[in-house]
Amino acid sequence: MKLGDIELHVVSAGHVLLDGGAMFGVIPKPMWEKKMPADGRNRITLSMNCLLIRAGGKRILVETGAGDKMSPKLRDIYGLDGPFLIDRLQTLDVKPADIDIVINTHLHFDHCGGNTRIENGEVVPVFPNARYLVQRGELDHAMHASERDKASYLPDNFAPVGAAGKLQLVEGECVVAPGVELVRVPGHTEHMQCVKVTGGGKVGFFFADLVPTTAHLPLPWIMGYDLYPMTTLENKKRWIPEAIREGWLALFAHDAKIPAAYLRNRDGQWEAEPVQVD
Ligand SMILES: [Zn+2]
């Protein structure tokens, strides 16, 4: 897909299976399972959607999926079938060394596990020539995660990137390349960031875990994982109507069927109109 001079691809890093109840917070199961059926372990199938953006001569990767460092036990718990990211980048003729910038919207393992891999027993960055952009507050939190969320933060996904001198910490809004902007959107975590891509009069907005799937468009459909659900609510009220009003292309981090859509307001109901992207 093209936004003016900017090229945008959605690249899935594979699937992750997460507890349906945790994914939909206060929404009762009979409601959410109509949209996303659960397996025998109450897990729903989510994709780990990444973006490859070419802008201003830079190759930018948004998110890296769960990677391949997890133990067989955790791979089973999370139903991981990847990693596919490197293979899928290859089909777009992009090698790890070609990536200039990696953006992690936050440091949960399903968004940054593919940052690093094990080579000769050592954990090293996958993208040797990239700087990795993370919000400073998100890294601080990841290093001191609470009992409630530390299972989501695996230091091997980000500490070796810092040790290699490749982490670039940003605070608040930041222009990454012409037309590519980071916006801090708290709620899921205090310092999560979304990515706004503007080109040729069009805007693509990567909702990260603010609206992880199209099923999460209605206001009360907020993940149980969110540390600040009332802030998520406020930010959904801000960003979804703006995306509808301005005709933005909405990009979803975890929707296995609809990674990209235009959002519509149909008689007060927010709906997604799927868009084919490669
Ligand atoms: Zn997350």
Image (tube, rainbow, N blue to C red):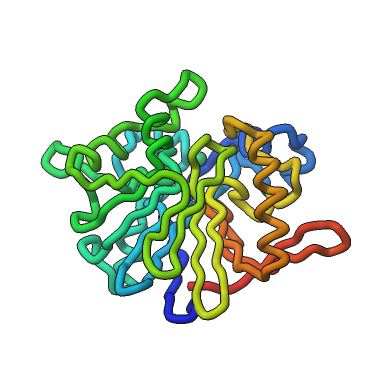
Residue 199 appearing in the image:
yes
Front-most of 28 and 80?
A: 28
Residue under the point 37% across and 65% down: 177
Q: Is residue 183 above or below residue 72?
A: below
Residue 5: x %, y % from top left: 43, 80
Residue 71, quarter of the rendered image? top left
Q: Could you tell whether 37 is left or right of 83 in the image?
A: right
Residue 20 seen in this snapshot: no
Percent x, y of residue 56: 34, 73
Q: Is 136 drawn above or below residue 9 in the view shown?
A: above
- Residue furthest top as drawn: 147
Question: x%, y% of residue 202?
Answer: 57, 75
| Residue 6 against residue 188 in the figure, above or below | below
Q: Which residue is drawn at 24% across and 39% down?
A: 162
* In this rendering, position of residue 90 left or right of residue 215: left
Q: Residue at x 43, y 25 (%)?
A: 145
Most foreground residue, 262 or 119: 262
- Of residues 209 and 31, which is closer to you in this image? 209
The structure residue drawn at horizontal position 14% and vertical position 37%, both measured from the top left corner, is 121
Residue at the limit of the structure toward the right, as seen here: 267
